[in-house]
Image: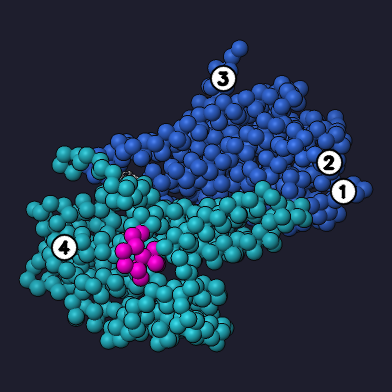
Chain colours: A blue, B cyan
Amino acid sequence: MYFGLSEEQKSLEENISKFLSDNAPLDTIKAVADGEEAKADDIHKGIIELGLSGLMVPESYGGLGLNMLFATVVSSALGAGTAPVPYAGAYVMAPIAITLAGDEDQKNEWLPKIAGGEKVIGVGLSEFVGAREDAGIEFDKGKVSGRSLFLIDGKNADAYLLANKSGELFLIDSSSKGITVTELVTVDKTRTSIELTLDKVDATLLPGSSDLSVIEKVLDAGRLMLSADTVGASQVMLDKAVAYSLERKQFGRLIGSFQAVKHMCAEMAAELEPCHSMIWHAAHSQDSSTEDARLMACQTKAHVSEVGKQISKTSTEVHGGMGFTDELGLHYWFKRIGLNRQLLGSPELIREEAGKLQGFDQ
Amino acid sequence: MDLEYGPEYDDFRSEVINFIKENEGVKLSGPMRDESRVNWQQKLIDNGYFARSVPKEYGGYGGHMDIIKLRIIAEEFAKSPIPKAMGGQGIQMLVPTLLSLGTEEQKQAYIRPTLRGEMIWCQGYSEPNSGSDLASLQTKGELDGDEWVINGQKIWTSTAQLAQMCFILVRTEPDAPKHQGISYLLMPMDSEGIDRRPIKQMTGDSDFNELFLTDVRIPAENIVGSRGEGWQVANATLGHERGSLADPNVTQNRLNSLIDLMKTETIDGQRVIDKPIFRDRLLSIQGRLMAQQSNALRILSSQINDGQDATLAKFIVKLQGTELRHELEGLAIDAMGELGTLYEDSPHLRDHGAWQQTYMYYLGLIIGGGTNQIQKNIISERALGMPKEPKVQGA
Ligand SMILES: Cc1cc2nc3c(=O)[nH]c(=O)nc-3n(C[C@H](O)[C@H](O)[C@H](O)COP(=O)(O)OP(=O)(O)OC[C@H]3O[C@@H](n4cnc5c(N)ncnc54)[C@H](O)[C@@H]3O)c2cc1C
C-alpha cells in the first residue's frame, strides 16, 4: 500500500511551479487580467513545452499516455499559480473524449495535434449538467443548432466539443459557417469563457459517445480538474495567510500570535489537508475505474468547492484591509476558486447527482 | 410583550405611506451632490423623514426624538423602491458627533450642508500600521499659532475622492499614553499638502484611498472635544457605524430580491426556488435574518424603555449582520450557477453584476469598521466580561 504521489509526479509538480513562478509572477497575471493576451499566449507555449498538452493523449497518438493522477498534479499546480492557460477542457476533457469515443479518423486528426500543442479544443458541457436560460444544442443529420454557454477553454479554440442533452458528444470546427462566438466576462480574469450560438453548423459525432459512460467519464475528469485547481489555489491562499500573519504586527505583536488568527489558519489547514488526499484518491479511482469513481468525482468537486469558498474568505480576512485590495492580488485566487465552484455544477447540483448515483432519489 | 406601537402611531404611518405613494415615481440618477439629490434630501428633511430630531437651526426637521417614528419611516421606506435618504460617514458618524460634542460654530457650519448631501465627509482613522490597533496611530498634529499642522499617512479612507471634508484622528500629545494623545480634527480636503491616491479593490472599484499628509494646515478651532480627547470622541460614534453596516431592514430588501431572482432563474427549465436544496438554504438565511430583526426590535425597545439592557444584543449586530449579508449574496451566486460568475459588462449579466460585487463588498465590510475578529474580542470582553489578553510590553 502506498497512498501519495510518486517521485515523478512530485517532480512534475515542482517543474510546473518553478516554470510559473519564473514566467507567470503576479505582475504577469495582472497584465493578462488587464487584457494583455500575448502574455497568456507565452505561458501557454511554455506549458506545452513542458509536455502538459500531451499528458492525457495516448502514446500511440504522440502523447505521454499518463493518467488522471498526473493530470490532477498538473491542475493543482496551475491553480496554485493562477495560470492563465487552457487546461481542463483542452488538454484533459477533450483528449479523453476523443480517445474513448472517437473513430480512428477523429483520433488521428485531433490527438497528435492536441499533444503537440497545435490545436485547442474548447469544451461545452454546461447544458448537459444543468441548462441555464433554456440553452442547449440539438444534433440533426450532421448539423448542430442551439446555444451553449460557458465553454471551458473555448476562446480562440480551433474546435469545440459539445454535448446534447442525451449526452452525445460532437466536434465542430471553429471556422465552420453558422457559429457566433460571444465572449463572456466572469470575475476570474485568469481564464476565458465564451458562449456559442449555432445555426446548422457541420458537426461530427464521436461515435462511441452514444454510450452514456463516455460523457460521464469526461465530466468526472473535468470536475476533478476543477477540484484540483481549487485545492492548489486554496493552498496558496492558506500559505499567504500564514506568511502574512508572521509579518504583520498590531498591538505590538505579530497578528499570527493572536489565537483568533491562529485558529483561522488552523481551520483552513484542517479543512484543506484532507482535500489533497481526496483529489489524489478520486484520481486513482478514475484511473482504476473503480465503482465509486463517479461518486468520488461528485463529492470531491462539491466538498472541495465548499472548502475553497471558506478558505478564500478566511485568508482574505487574515490579510485585513490589504486582503481586499487589487494590489495584493489575493483576489485572483479568490475569484479562480469562485469560478471553479460553478463550472460543471455547483455543490448543490452535484450533491443531487451524488444522491442519485446511490439511488437516494427513488 | 406588546408589539403595537400604539394608536397614535397609526396616523403617522398612514402619513408616511401617503408620502411614499405621492413620490413613487422619483428616481435619482447623477453623481453625489447633484442638485436632484440635494433637493430630494431636503424634501425628506422638510417632511421629517430624515434628520428628524436634528434641530431646525442646524438644518434638521426639529422634531422630538421618537425612535418609534424613525422605525416606522425605516419600515415603510424599506418596502418601497423610492430613493432612501442618503447615508455615508458624514451623516452617520460626523453629525451625531458634532451634535453631542461639537461647538456651536461647528454645528452651524457643518451639519446643514452635510445633511443636505452637499458636503461629503470621509473618515481618516486607519493608518498603514494602525488598523485593528487604531489607538497606535502616528499621524502628527502640531499646533503652530492658530493652525494645526498635520503630517502623516492615512489609508483605506473611503469616499475621500468625493469628500470635501475629513474627520481625522491625529496624535497631538506624543508624550501621553496612546489612548490619551489623540485629537479629533476636521480637515478640509482641498487643503494644501493632501496627496490622495486611490486604492483599487478586489471588486474592481476604487472607493477607498491613501492620504499622504504633508504640512497640511487647518484652523486651530477645527477640533472636536479637547486636545487628547479624540479617542473618546471617535468612540462615541463608532457604534453608529457598526450598527449601520448591517441593518437587517436593508438585508430584508436584499432577501426579497434574492427570492425574486430564485423565482426567475431556472436549471433545466425548473425554477431554482423549486429545488429543495436551494430553497432550504434560502429559508435558513431567512430564519437567521428574522432572528436579527427580532434582535433589532429588542434594541429598539431598550432605547425607549428604562431598565431594559440590550448591551450584548447591540454588540453582535455588526458581526452577525455582515456575515449574513455575505452569505446571502453568495447564495444568489450559487443560485445563478455559472451565470453568477459574470461580471463587468458581460452578456447575460444579472442585476448589473451587483450580486458578485456585493458578495465581495461585504467581505470588505467583514474586515472594515473593526474586523469581525475584533468584534468577537469586544463581545467577549465587554459584554461577557471575559479578561483581555495580556498587554505586550511597550505596545
Ligand atoms: C471596505 C473597507 C472600507 C474601509 N473604510 C475605512 C474608512 O473610511 N476610514 C478608515 O479610517 N478606515 C477604513 N477601513 C479600514 C478598516 O477599519 C481596517 O481595515 C480594519 O480596522 C482592519 O485593520 P487592518 O486592515 O490594518 O488589518 P489588521 O489590523 O492588520 O488585521 C489583520 C488580521 O489580524 C486580525 N487581528 C488584529 N488584531 C487582532 C486581535 N487583537 N485579536 C484577534 N485578531 C486580530 C484581524 O482581525 C485581521 O484578521 C476600511 C476597510 C475596508 C475593508
Where residue A94 appears, as percent x and y from the top left, is 73, 36
Q: Residues within 10 Å of mark 3 (few under 14, many from 20)?
A: few
Nearer to us: label 2 or label 3: 3
Q: Secondary structure at mark 4?
A: loop
Answer yes or no: are tags 1 and 4 on the same subunit.
no
Image quarter of residue B260: bottom right
Residue identifier under label 2? A168
Q: Please report the bounds of the magenta region as a residue range.
A: B299-310
- Tag 1, which chain? A
- The Cα atoms of the two marked residues, 1 and 4, are separated by 76 Å
Indicate left or right for B334 with A208 as reference. left
At mark 2, the secondary structure is loop
Tally of marks: 4
Amino acid carrying mark 1 in the image:
Phe
Q: Is residue A163 magenta?
A: no
Q: Nearer the viewer, residue B290 or A143?
A: B290
- Tell me which amino acid carries mark 3: Gly
Could you tell me which quadrant the N terminus of chain B lies in? bottom left
Q: Is residue B302 magenta?
A: yes
Kindly identify the amino acid type of the residue bearing the numbered disc 4. Answer: Glu
Instruction: Tell me the distance, in whole angstroms, between the alpha carbons under discs 2 and 3.
Output: 35 Å
Amino acid at circle 2: Glu
Q: Between A138 and B274, which is closer to the camera in this rendering?
A: B274
- A228 or B14: nearer the viewer: B14
| Residue position marked by numbered label 3 in the rendering | A4
Q: Are marks 1 and 2 in contact (CB under 8 Å)?
A: yes
Residue shown at the point (48%, 62%) measured from the top left: B293
- A40 shown above or below A56: below
In front: label 1 or label 4: 4
Query: Which residue sits at x=59%, y=64%?
Result: B256
Chain of residue at mark 4: B
